Amino acid sequence: MPVARTDPARLVAFEVLRAVSDQDAYANLELSRLLRERGVSGRDAALATELVGGTLRLQGSYDDILDRLVKGTLQPPVRDALRLGTHQLLSMRVPTHAAVTTTVDLVKEQIGHKPSGLVNAVLRKVAAQDLESWLTDRPRPARTAHPAWVIDALAEALDRPAELDALLAADNERPAVVLVARPGLADVAELGGSALAASPYAVELEGGDPGAVPAVREGRAGVQDAGSQLVALVLARAALEGDDQRWLDVCAGPGGKAALLAAIAAERGAGVLANERQRHRAQLVAQGVRAARAGVLGVVTGDGTRPPWSPGTFDRVLVDAPCSGLGALRRRPESRWRRTAADVEELVPLQVALLDAALDAARPGGVVLYATCSPVVAETAGVVRTVLERRTDAVVEPALDLIGDLEDAESAHLPGALQLWPHRHRTDAMFLSLLRRR
Ligand SMILES: C[S@@+](CC[C@H](N)C(=O)[O-])C[C@H]1O[C@@H](n2cnc3c(N)ncnc32)[C@H](O)[C@@H]1O
């Protein structure tokens, strides 16, 4: 075995990229696993995180450049190494010499001597221009690092075509670490960082490890995008006449919104029943709501389309539906390359069935919030419209008054519903539609 010369951050990043390419691994999960196993922390962990996230988000642009420089097919491990080197050269401030040498050494160690000459030569050519020059005049998918079908779906969802490039650029940025201070359990002031407009419980961290924040370790706070916090808030803020004790989260795993809802419910003497179809995700929910247990009615594993609960039982119901996730591309760096248009078509019938069942679960006068971390019209406004065409006992209620100062947040595809955008609101592109059971 050669003596490893590659630094731990680059080695971890390369292994994560290989697992994503070869085994369909989820980058975030694989990255945390390897960082933990190798004891990589602090600045090295931050470097590995940037290398993985940045390389994967911009993969389409880097491949466009590499394919112009290499004649013939690249072995997948060599391509991954070249992507990693290209990211350092074109998007990070790594000096050319360091980016090239570390990548060549990595290739020698992890793949073999043979391709190292090619990698050296290609990376020197990559370094000859900056990213902007490489991508000027390229077709939009290459220039913006988004598959063409994703661009089309986002363009259809966005009400202002002039903002499309700003949206695609926002998808390519490293997401800020945002924490939620769960009310009654933690205070925003104890989390450090700066407040965010989208949610009164949100704090954006400058950097560092959120796991080092005591309130996060104790489950009184958590990592949660401000748009996701708003989902729980809108449901909790909707006006209600009569009973307000029983709340339901139909698709609760892994539990971020259930934990916030439970904290709010506890303050009001209400409780949340958290349901999730997958057992291991239901276990994550149970762990996540521990600190807010005063606001938890229970955590159950079940299919929300064939629920065990009686109809008309709940005062407030959340359906945070399984979706394409095209509104959270910043956070799931590989997903844009893995998802297909067929996934959206497959999800729609399940989303319709879940919303239908959620309306059945609400009592007359009760509210249901349908949410997705996707702006795609078919799985947002399309789902709500389909359900409302079938039943006469539900109406969409305007939710704009429930979200404070956020501007330009009304959905262009369903009056009354909300559509957040990363480039406008600095949140994931969450869709929220509030419905009331008549
Ligand atoms: C978008 S995620 C929910 C995220 C969650 N609300 C949170 O804030 O952490 C959708 C969840 O729905 C679950 N799911 C999918 N089909 C379901 C079904 N038929 N019934 C209940 N849950 C389902 C998935 O396993 C997934 O955990």
Image (cartoon, rainbow, N blue to C red):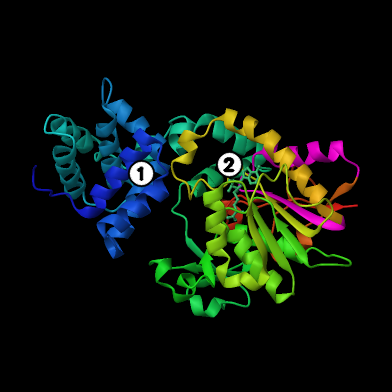
Q: Amino acid at mark 1?
A: Thr
Q: Quadrant of residue 397?
A: bottom right
**Image location of residue 53, percent across then percent down:** 39, 48
Q: Residue at x 43, y 53 (%)?
A: 174
Q: Residue at x 11, y 33 (%)?
A: 113
**Image location of residue 328, percent across then percent down:** 54, 48
Whichever of labels 2 and 1 marks the residue nearer the N terminus, that label is 1
> As rendered, which of 387 and 400 lies closer to the eye?
387
Question: Is 375 one of the magenta-colored residues?
Answer: yes
Stretch of the chain drawn in magenta:
364-392
The answer to whether residue 47 of the structure is visible from this angle is no
What residue is shown with label 1?
A: 55
Q: Quadrant of residue 154?
A: top right
Residue 383 higher or lower than 204, as above or below: above
Residue 172 higher or lower than 190, as above or below: above
Q: Residues within 10 Å of mark 1 (few under 14, many from 20)?
A: many
Q: Residue at x 52, y 34 (%)?
A: 339
> As rendered, which of 195 and 92 lies closer to the eye?
195
Helix, strand or loop under label 2: helix
Residue 85 higher or lower than 226, as above or below: above
What residue is shown with label 2?
A: 164
> As rendered, which of 143 and 217 lies closer to the eye?
217
The answer to whether residue 9 of the structure is visible from this angle is yes
**Image location of residue 122, percent across then percent down:** 22, 33
> As rendered, which of 382 and 152 lies closer to the eye?
382
**Image location of residue 341, percent across then percent down:** 58, 29
